[in-house]
Amino acid sequence: MGNVGLNFGSATSGEGFDVTSTVNQIVANLQTVETPWKNRLTDLQARDTALTSLGMQLSTLTNDLLALTDFQGIMAAKTGSSSDTGVLQLSFASATAIAGTHTVLIQNLAQTSSAASDAIQASDILTGGITFKVGDGAWQTVDVGDSSTQSTLAGLSAAINAAGLGVQASVLTNADGTQRLTLVSRTPGANGQITIADLTNNPSSPTTLADSTTPDANVGIGLKTVQRGLDAVINVDGIEVTSASNSVSNAIPGVTFQLLSTGASTSSAGTTGPENIQVVIANDISSIESAISTFVDDYNTAIKAVNAQEGKDSTGTAEALYGTSVLAQMQQGLQSAFSASSGSGAVNSLISLGITATATSDGTIALDLDMLSNALNNNFDQVVSFFQDTGKFGSTFKRTLDSLGTSSTRGGAIALALKEDQRQESTLSDNIEKQEALIATQKVHLTAQLSLANQILQSIPQQIQQVDEMYSAITGYKSK
């Protein structure tokens, strides 16, 4: 601890001394005991920053690896193509789809049933009601004017929709201002067929709709089915499949495609017929190459960051993790994982995928996309096995990353180092806090004591003057 000097000047000057400055010097002296604690705390916080940064990079690398090891991930992704996108268009190929080529023959497209009335004036008043059914459902009747509904096409349309009878009613307006009632089935395909009741198919309750303003020539103002509900019929690899919708997902497992047309082809006899469409489902090689390339890039970023901790910063100070065991663990763990081999097939190491060490000898790696593409196209199943089978690269490197990273539940090296640092930081912070509290108490006492001493020093000239006056009064001698 250093010394604190008090400069009183002349004891009889009455000037005293600067109490605040003196107390601050003493406090600064007392605080020197905290210096090694604070320096250690700063070092630990710098370590934490470096460890957290490396942990984030390992986490990114882990996520890259998970994309390749996930059974439903990028390795299972599929792409699809159609030989004629004007006839059949691929919408989706899930991970459950199996790569292969399929022949699809579209015999007819699906249709949604609809019905329409004759055109009448918008203001014409209607009477009677409409009776219809959807598919094999029960007959349903909606009378005009019920429940205060206007007896017009608009009012009837609103009443049908409000009843929720399985159709969507609308009123279409023609160029001349006349209107038509339309019904569109809410059920696509054959099961949604709209049937309008008449004296033949439902004689007990036929449609009785009539125009009382301008009588229509047709019964029920001509309301009738204008489009039948049909299921799409397709032939996939020789097997007939039906679909209520032109969006078909039940023909090729894991694949959804849209039917746009039956196409047309001319035979040698001059007859025309549906066109055979080739649907190709393939592994998504491009996305896999991109994922592996990202994995290689993120690995290099991580190993470079680890290596950078071995040196010094721009000021010549050693990096925060220099010489630590956790840094050595990360270097060894990352580099050793890439030298292992597994299996005896064509794809048994990273080298067989075109991933090799760079010439810089710093642990970084490089990717040969041509070799990777060749492995994926010729030995796809072995590539999948290399990343996803137990005991092979994907699973072993995942364990390595878990043992190095920030996973506290799995005892990652970074997680353990951060936990130990936090323990030390807590102890140091407590010591500093207690020391500061002690110093604060001492500062109060010092300030009071030195203020009193300063008052005494400042009062000395007055006391001397009083003594001088008493002396003069007694002796008659005036002191100078």
Image: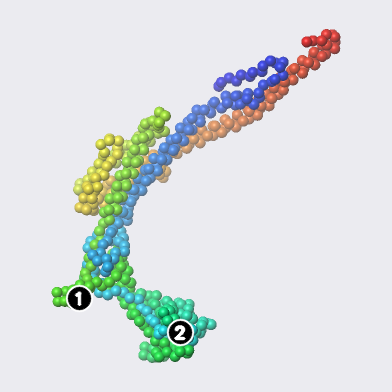
Task: Tell me where residue 380 appears, x and y as whole percent.
Answer: 23, 53
In the foreground, 384 or 93? 93
Q: Amino acid at mark 1?
A: Thr
Task: Give neighbour class at mark 1: few <14, some 14-19, many 20+ (Cα, 10 Å).
Answer: few
Q: Position of residue 448 (x, y in %)?
A: 68, 26
Q: Residues within 10 Å of mark 2 (few under 14, many from 20)?
A: some
Residue occupying the point 48% across, 31% down: 40
Can see residue 181? Answer: no
| Image coords of residue 375 (percent x, y) | 22, 50
In terms of image quadrants, where is residue 216?
bottom left
* For discs 2 and 1, the disc positioned in front in the rendered view: 2
The residue indicated by pointer 2 is 121
**Which residue is labeled 1 in the image?**
272
Q: CA gap, disc 2 to disc 1?
A: 45 Å
Q: In the picture shown, does residue 152 fall above or below 188?
A: below
Q: Quadrant of the C terminus?
A: top right
Instruction: Give the amino acid at mark 2.
Output: Gln
